[in-house]
Image (spheres, rainbow, N blue to C red):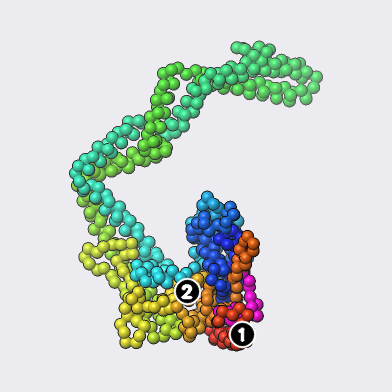
């Protein structure tokens, strides 16, 4: 569950920590107090985009931190993903997400204090939290979203089948592009053959060798600095040899020989001088090796104009090829191999086309088979979803509603293979007994859409086992008995998930396990958002305010508030 959320320098919030508890958490407060900022901050923490305009005026950076605690079951599901991305899970199940955004639009993402990419943060966030806002209701009005929702409910078996289909579709589309290339306009094909011929000839005629560019660049560096290198080597050789001979006393080698001679004469007095003598002799051998290396290096620095010209010309050729075909010799060769393969296909286009067409026929059969497999899994999921949603709708005063998914399969001889296979899906609904189900977009009212989406989210949440569900004012268009039913549904969902909801309905606030009041205070030069965890008295006042706008909740309003809280608690107890 989400234990706490800390927000710094976001919109009108300078610093705010909000604590959440298990079960159902309800955020209430006046319009504009900052409830949506809290939800938006959670969305940003989970990987959604934040604009620079969302950073508090006068601040350099916005920061959001969320502390989660995983149950043993949740840890079993999420810990392997943490390990996969290189993060050692905490023994107590703690997961801390952090994200920042500065005025330049850049920021940092962390999981348990380890820097991660935004995509990694988003991947973990999707396992922890599902956010549902008011705009999600409207997505139900677009049939194009329905198949995605159905697939989410269908689970991993369909996901695996879809992966198989997608791989086949990708190959099919690549082959289509290749066929178009070799079977298109003859003039364009001839032009492409000329271009590919020039490119392959240019690369292969260069006879590039592995590591050649690095060797030439090293040689060029020696050539450019030959004079300084020669002087340095000559000076070093002189310091060792003292001139052209090893025995010149002016060099280190000559002085070392003198030392060897002196110690040799002392050896007859004590065996202890023998070890010293051996060390001196070792030094003489090392100096001899070093001097040989210096002389070899000196010879290599002597570069004639012919070699210097070759190195410069060769490097110019390699740099020109890199500008055209890749950043390394390996990439240039890879480009040439690909170009040569395309060239061979174009020159043998009839044979290639025949081979590709045969493979396309085979792929169509395989895709049809894979699409049928997906269709069968979707049919099973559609029946299961229908049962779950109608049960959930019945719990929310919509027991007469019939919900179903119309699933159409393109069974033509030459169907149009799309990314979802050969299926199209659309949710259908009948709100009155005896009526045939019709498209959801044409029938459902705003309040019905809210309840349908809540029913769907509750079904999907059970399938996905996401621990935290967030609902941002999805109670639009709901009142009376329907509001009480929706509140009861929230409680039922909160028995297996942590629920965080933003609402203006007294019934939902009354049934919540934890109430948080969001308010806005003003100073001479500032405005600040605050979040207060309400005690029992505070809850009574807030439910009263939601009932009739009276923040004091005295008299009749207070009595009504107490009665509603008591009644909703009784209803919540029945949901356990």
- Residue 562 shows in this picture: no
Q: Percent from the top left, x then y, of residue 245?
A: 61, 12
Q: Is residue 515 left or right of residue 196?
A: right
Dot 1 crowding, Cα within 10 Å, few <14, some 14–19, many 20+: many
In the displayed structure, 166 sits above or below 288; it is below
Report which residue position mark 1 lands on.
Answer: 558
Q: CA distance from mark 2 to mark 1?
A: 26 Å
Which quadrant holds residue 334?
A: top left
Toward the front, the furthest residue is 524
Q: Nearer the viewer, residue 456 or 169?
A: 456
In the displayed structure, 464 sits above or below 46; it is below
- Residue 58 shows in this picture: yes
Mark 2 falls on what kind of element?
Answer: loop
In the displayed structure, 5 sits above or below 337; it is below
Q: Percent from the top left, x then y, of residue 172?
A: 29, 56
Which quadrant holds residue 216?
A: top left
Q: Percent from the top left, x then y, of residue 525?
A: 63, 60
> Magenta region's main secondary structure?
helix
Placement of the C terminus among the 4 image quadrants? bottom right
Report which residue position mark 2 lands on.
Answer: 474
Identify the magenta region: 531-546
Dot 2 crowding, Cα within 10 Å, few <14, some 14–19, many 20+: many
Taking the magenta stretch, the answer to whether it contains residue 55 is: no
């Amino acid at each position: 569950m989400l234990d706490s959320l800390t927000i710094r320098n976001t919109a009108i919030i300078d610093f705010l920590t909000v604590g959440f508890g298990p079960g159902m958490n309800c955020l209430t407060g006046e319009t504009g107090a900052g409830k949506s900022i809290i939800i938006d901050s959670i969305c940003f923490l989970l990987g959604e985009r934040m604009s620079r305009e969302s950073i508090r005026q006068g601040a350099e950076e916005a920061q959001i931190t969320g502390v989660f605690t995983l149950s043993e079951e949740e840890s079993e599901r999420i810990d392997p993903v943490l390990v996969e991305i290189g993060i050692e899970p905490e023994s107590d199940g703690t997961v801390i997400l952090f994200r920042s955004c500065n005025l330049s639009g850049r920021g940092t993402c962390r999981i348990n204090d380890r820097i991660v990419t935004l995509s990694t943060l988003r991947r973990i966030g999707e396992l922890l939290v599902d956010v549902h806002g008011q705009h999600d209701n409207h997505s139900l009005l677009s049939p194009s979203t329905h198949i995605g929702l159905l697939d989410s409910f269908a689970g991993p078996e369909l996901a695996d089948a879809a992966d198989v289909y997608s791989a086949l579709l990708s190959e099919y589309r690549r082959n289509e592009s290749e066929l178009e290339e070799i079977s298109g306009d003859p003039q364009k094909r001839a032009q492409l053959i000329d271009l590919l011929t020039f490119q392959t000839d240019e690369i292969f005629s260069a006879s590039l060798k592995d590591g050649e560019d690095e060797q030439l660049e090293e040689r060029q560096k020696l050539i450019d600095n030959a004079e300084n290198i020669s002087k340095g080597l000559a000076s070093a050789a002189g310091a060792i040899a003292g001139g052209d001979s090893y025995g010149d006393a002016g060099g280190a080698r000559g002085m070392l020989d003198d030392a060897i001679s002196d110690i040799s004469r002392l050896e007859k007095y004590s065996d202890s001088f023998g070890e010293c003598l051996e060390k001196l002799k070792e030094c003489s051998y090392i100096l001899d090796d070093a001097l040989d290396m210096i002389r070899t290096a000196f010879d290599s620095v002597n570069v004639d104009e012919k070699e210097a010209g070759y190195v410069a010309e060769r490097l110019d050729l390699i740099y020109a090829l890199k500008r055209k075909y890749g950043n390394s010799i390996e990439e240039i060769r890879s480009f040439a191999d690909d170009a040569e393969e395309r060239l061979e296909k174009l020159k043998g286009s009839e044979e290639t086309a025949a081979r590709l067409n045969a493979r396309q026929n085979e792929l169509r059969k395989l895709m049809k088979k894979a699409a049928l497999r997906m269709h069968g899994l979707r049919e099973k999921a559609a029946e299961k979803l229908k049962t779950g949603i109608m049960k959930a709708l019945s719990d929310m005063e919509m027991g007469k509603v019939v919900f179903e998914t119309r699933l159409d399969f393109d069974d033509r001889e030459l169907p149009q293979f799309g990314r979802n296979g050969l299926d199209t899906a659309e949710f259908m609904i009948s709100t009155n007994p005896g009526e045939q189900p019709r498209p959801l977009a044409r029938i459902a009212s705003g309040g019905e859409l809210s309840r349908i989406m809540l029913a769907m989210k509750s079904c999907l949440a059970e399938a996905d086992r996401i621990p935290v569900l967030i609902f941002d004012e999805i109670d639009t268009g709901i009142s009376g008995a329907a509001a009480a039913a929706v509140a009861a549904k929230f409680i039922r969902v909160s028995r297996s998930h942590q629920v965080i909801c933003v609402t203006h309905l007294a019934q939902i606030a009354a049934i919540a396990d934890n109430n948080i009041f969001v308010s806005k205070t003003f100073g001479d030069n500032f405005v600040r958002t605050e979040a207060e965890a309400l005690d029992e008295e505070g809850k009574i006042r807030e439910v009263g305010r939601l009932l009739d706008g009276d923040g004091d909740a005295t008299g009749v309003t207070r009595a009504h508030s107490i009665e509603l809280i008591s009644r909703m608690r009784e209803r919540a107890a029945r949901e356990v």
